[in-house]
Image (tube, helix red, strand yellow):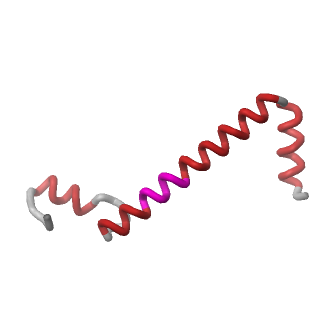
Amino acid sequence: MGKGNILCLSLKSKLGSCGRRLEEMCEFQSKRVDIRLLAVAEERDECGNGGTGERKNYRHRTGRGKR
């Protein structure tokens, strides 16, 4: 067991039920990050512009561009 794991377990035991809630919150946030990364990756596949929405914004600003 690594030093970080021991520290984490020690902190969780001191926090008790709050530690479990904190762990649930961290897991939830981790899933949200995964979902956002997936959304960006899908946008890159659709737009081919690195997920920036650059083409769409260009078309909106200028009224030109691929439709």
Q: Which residues are magenta?
A: 34-40
x 43%, y 56%: residue: 39
The x and y percentages for residue 18 are: 77, 29
Count of numbered circles in the view: 0
x 32%, y 66%: residue: 46
Name which quarter of the figure residue 62 lies in. bottom left
Q: Relative to 35, is 21 above or below? A: above
The x and y percentages for residue 48 are: 32, 70
Name which quarter of the figure residue 19 lies in. top right
Question: Where is the C terminus found, in terms of image quarters?
Answer: bottom left
Q: Relative to 54, is 26 above or below? A: above
The x and y percentages for residue 51 are: 36, 62
Q: Nearer the viewer, residue 22 or 52?
A: 22
Decide if residue 64 is on the left or right side of residue 49: left
Decide if residue 63 is on the left or right side of residue 9: left
Residue 37 falls within the magenta-colored stretch: yes
Q: Nearer the viewer, residue 43 or 53?
A: 43
x 66%, y 45%: residue: 27
Kindly report the secondary structure that dominates the magenta region of the rendered protein: helix
Residue 10 falls within the magenta-colored stretch: no
Question: Where is the N terminus found, in terms of image quarters?
Answer: bottom right
Identity of the residue furthest to the left in this view: 63
Decide if residue 40 is on the left or right side of residue 28: left
Decide if residue 26 is on the left or right side of residue 20: left
The x and y percentages for residue 16 are: 84, 30
x 72%, y 33%: residue: 21
